[in-house]
Image (cartoon, rainbow, N blue to C red):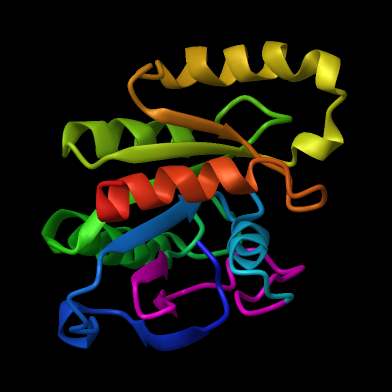
């Protein structure tokens, strides 16, 4: 998709605040430092529309981005960040769950994992959760530029094994530095959002 116009519509914490655009929505989920903001910024060709932060755990709301009046990205709070209190994490969890299980506009969830590491317990839980609720999932392995290409397969296989990856799901190798996987990511998003 050619992206020229992007706006943040709203940062929501409850269904009453979700925007009523009727547009398809793609949610983005992942650990706090997995590169979610960089992934969004790369896809929409912006430097800092989604705030990248040296302080993980910065996103505390559901941030709705309007892409070309055709599609919404929904950035959800990163998980697995130790400095956030348990009660705060539980609150985020409830907010994310409420959104993902009730939002009819939600077409797919991009589940971001770090190519360099085995998926965390939370990564596995997120994947299982999405499968349980039959929510289409696109797994994106970030930071591909940090690993030598000759070792990619080894890391991909380790991630797929840990997730018990369903081969019918999309799996995309991605780097915000080299823009690798950008076209594949857009192709997967458009397929789910528009049935293309």
Q: Nearer the viewer, residue 120 or 184?
A: 184
Residue found at x 25% / y 64%: 24
Q: Position of residue 12 (x, y in %)?
A: 32, 82
Q: Position of residue 161 (x, y in %)?
A: 50, 12
Residue found at x 55% / y 49%: 31
Counting the numbered discs, the total is: 0
Task: Classify 148 as above or below 180.
Answer: above
Residue found at x 32% / y 67%: 91
Residue 170, image quadrant = top left
Residue found at x 39% / y 88%: 9
Q: Position of residue 148 (x, y in %)?
A: 87, 24
Report if residue 1 lies within the magenta region: no
Residue 120 seen in this snapshot:
no
Query: Would residue 142 be found to the left or right of residue 135 on screen?
Result: right
Report if residue 57 lies within the magenta region: yes
Q: Position of residue 103 (x, y in %)?
A: 16, 63
Task: Classify 158 as above or below 41.
Answer: above
Query: Would residue 138 be found to the left or right of residue 104 on screen?
Result: right
Q: Nearer the viewer, residue 84 or 191?
A: 191
Task: Classify 160 as above or below 51.
Answer: above
- Give the residues in magenta: 48-74
Residue 111, image quadrant = top left
Most prominent secondary structure in the magenta stretch?
loop
Residue 156 seen in this snapshot:
yes
């Amino acid at each position: 998709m050619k992206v020229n116009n992007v706006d943040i519509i709203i940062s929501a914490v409850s269904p009453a605040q979700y925007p009523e655009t009727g547009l398809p929505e793609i949610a983005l989920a992942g650990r706090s430092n997995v590169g979610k903001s960089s992934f969004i910024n790369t896809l929409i060709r912006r430097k800092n529309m989604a705030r990248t932060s040296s302080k993980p755990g910065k996103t505390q709301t559901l941030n709705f981005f309007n892409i070309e009046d055709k599609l919404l990205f929904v950035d959800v709070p990163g998980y697995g960040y130790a400095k956030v209190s348990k009660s705060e994490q539980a609150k985020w969890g409830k907010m994310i769950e409420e959104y993902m299980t009730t939002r009819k506009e939600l077409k797919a969830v991009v589940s971001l994992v770090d190519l360099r590491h085995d998926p965390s317990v939370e990564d596995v839980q997120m994947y299982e959760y999405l499968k349980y609720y039959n929510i289409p999932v696109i797994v994106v392995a970030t930071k591909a530029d940090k690993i030598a290409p000759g070792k990619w397969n080894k890391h991909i296989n380790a991630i797929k094994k840990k997730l018990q990856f369903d081969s019918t799901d999309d799996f995309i190798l991605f780097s915000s530095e080299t823009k690798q996987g950008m076209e594949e990511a857009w192709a997967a998003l458009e397929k789910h959002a528009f049935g293309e």
